[in-house]
Image: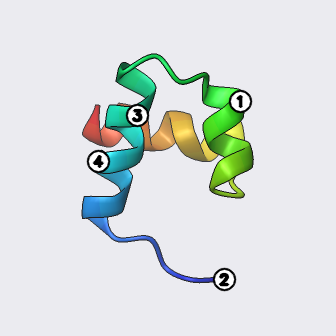
Amino acid sequence: MKKITEHQIVSILKEAESGIAVKELCRKYSMGNSTFYKWWEKYG
């Protein structure tokens, strides 16, 4: 698995803020919901 950079994480979170569903983002970036919400807590 490729390591995701902090810049990429922030970009993904901004996509969520723009209205894209978390479920869609998780599918698009092949990650679990729990990963997204851990990032949201740390960077959101």
How far apart, in angstroms, are the residues tagged by discs 3 and 1?
12 Å
- Residue 15 numbered mark, or none: 3
Q: Nearer the viewer, mark 4 or mark 3?
A: 3
Residues under numbered marks 4 and 3 in contact, where contact means CB atoms less than 8 Å apart = no
Q: Amino acid at mark 4?
A: Val
- Mark 4 nearby-residue class (10 Å; few <14, some 14–19, many ≥20): some
Q: Quadrant of residue 8?
A: bottom left
Q: Which residue carries the number 2 mark?
A: 1
Earlier-in-chain disc, 3 versus 2: 2
Q: Amino acid at mark 1?
A: Lys
Earlier-in-chain disc, 3 versus 1: 3
- Residue 12 numbered mark, or none: none
- Which residue is situated farthest in the top direction here? 19
Could you tell me which residue is drawn at 32 percent across and 34 percent down? 14
- Residue 23 numbered mark, or none: 1
- Which residue is situated farthest in the bottom direction here? 2
- Residue 10 numbered mark, or none: 4
Q: Is residue 30 above or below residue 38?
A: below
Identify the secondary structure beneath mark 1: helix
How far apart, in angstroms, are the residues tagged by discs 4 and 3?
9 Å
Q: Is residue 22 above or below residue 28?
A: above
Identify the secondary structure beneath mark 2: loop
Earlier-in-chain disc, 1 versus 2: 2
- Mark 2 nearby-residue class (10 Å; few <14, some 14–19, many ≥20): few
How far apart, in angstroms, are the residues tagged by discs 2 and 4?
19 Å
